[in-house]
Image (tube, rainbow, N blue to C red):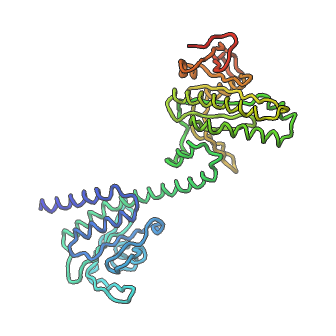
Amino acid sequence: MDRYYKERFHAQQNLIRKTAPLMEVNEIIEKVREELRKIIPNAMEVCILLLDPEAGNYTSPLQCALYEQPVNCQSCKRNRPAVQKAIQKKKAVVVSQSEPVRRMDNSLVAVGSEYAMPVFVEDRVLATISVVIQPLTRYTRRDFFLIRDFADILGNIILNAKRQWEITQDKIRISRKLNHLTPFVPGSVRHMVDKNPELLTLEKERKEVTILFLDLEGYTSLSSRWPETQVNAIIEKMFSSFVDPIHRSQGDINETAGDALMIIFKDHDAKTNAINAVKAAFEIVDQNRAFNLSLDPEIGAIDVNIGINSGSALVGMSRFKGLLHTRMTFTATGRVTNIAARLSDHAKLGDILIGEETQKMVAGLLPVYPLGPVSLKGVKDPVLVFSLLRSPESKPVK
């Protein structure tokens, strides 16, 4: 008796071990069939019928020893008396005289008894598992227990595999949608949603970020002097020259508003985010200088003013829900974002202004010029401001 229970235990553990790494439902079903055929000596074939109406979407025909060809168990087993009775009665059933199996060439294959058992998940019948044995042979008590053990394990395995399939389908659908929206969705957001589709429904989380705002000086004057289409072409060409430097520094272009851009650096620790933002800012300034040299002298130079600030922000999806439509955008909100925007407004003549927290993280890496406490529009208290490019009165902070 001890050996019998040990055999059942080892059979269960062996099945769990062999199906654990499998993700596809078909692979799991095939492995269960294979293991049962090994341990039921008289088995001709093991058949598993999924009752899920969507099963045809995530399963495919499997090779059947009875038919000697791949067979869709979803259609075959529904017509067999043992399976039908097991589904109706919600308990194991043995049909002692099974009908011969008619193959595609019209030949008949004699079979013995068929034992069918429902596979439950909680109180729901998810599938049936049936074993057809050789003619003139019988099931043993051991066979019944082993089939029942496998049925107990199979339900949760199939349910988990189906859930994984559904998650994969969600990822595919979202990925297809994002592929169409690629130019409008930040790269890191696409990667995050691809890994975790539930991101779209999650609340914002607090993260250490660095925000960079850039604003074009003289845009209003330019718009008043030149045709709208020409101004738009100039701005698009200039901003396009900034895209590669931003992405090289692992920033996400979050918002555009006419003559301004908001860029978020959030994928690393606080210091790395700050350094990446400053690196992007210097590359943008270099690109801006080169771009100005290509402009018609009558248009004149267009300066890019940059504000950078570091700190804690709420990062994630903002949802604006109306009766007819919901608008979603991925952004970072809070004081850190507001100050970065105000710093870019305060900057003049193509300067790069940074806040105190950013200054602390880049100190010693490059010259930083203190401008002292500055009152910024929309910010209650004066803010310590630093320039990365110029200060006529101050010496660089070491």
Q: Is residue 150 left or right of residue 198?
A: left
In the depicted view, which residue is nearer to us: 82 or 338? 338
81 relative position to 139: left or right: right
- The answer to whether residue 45 is above or below residue 332 is below
Residue in the picture at 55% in, 22% down: 362
Residue 298 pos. (x, y %): 85, 32
Q: Is residue 102 left or right of residue 184?
A: left
Quadrant (top left/top right/bottom left/bottom right) for the C terminus: top right
Residue 266 in which image quadrant: top right
Q: Is residue 180 above or below residue 77?
A: above
Q: Residue furthest bottom?
A: 106
Q: Position of residue 109 (x, y in %)?
A: 30, 85
Identified at 28% across, 60% down, the residue is 15
Residue drawn at x 82%, y 41% as measured from the top left: 230
Q: Is residue 189 visible?
A: yes
Q: Can you see residue 93?
A: no
Query: x, y (%) of residue 32?
Result: 31, 65
- Residue 129 vs 385, above or below: the answer is below
Instruction: Check the picture and name the quadrant holding the N terminus.
Output: bottom left
x 75%, y 34%: residue: 259
How many numbered discs, if any? 0
Q: Quadrant of residue 320?
A: top right
From the viewer's side, name the closer residue of 229 and 211.
Answer: 229
Residue 121: % across, % down? 37, 60
Picture quadrant of residue 216: top right
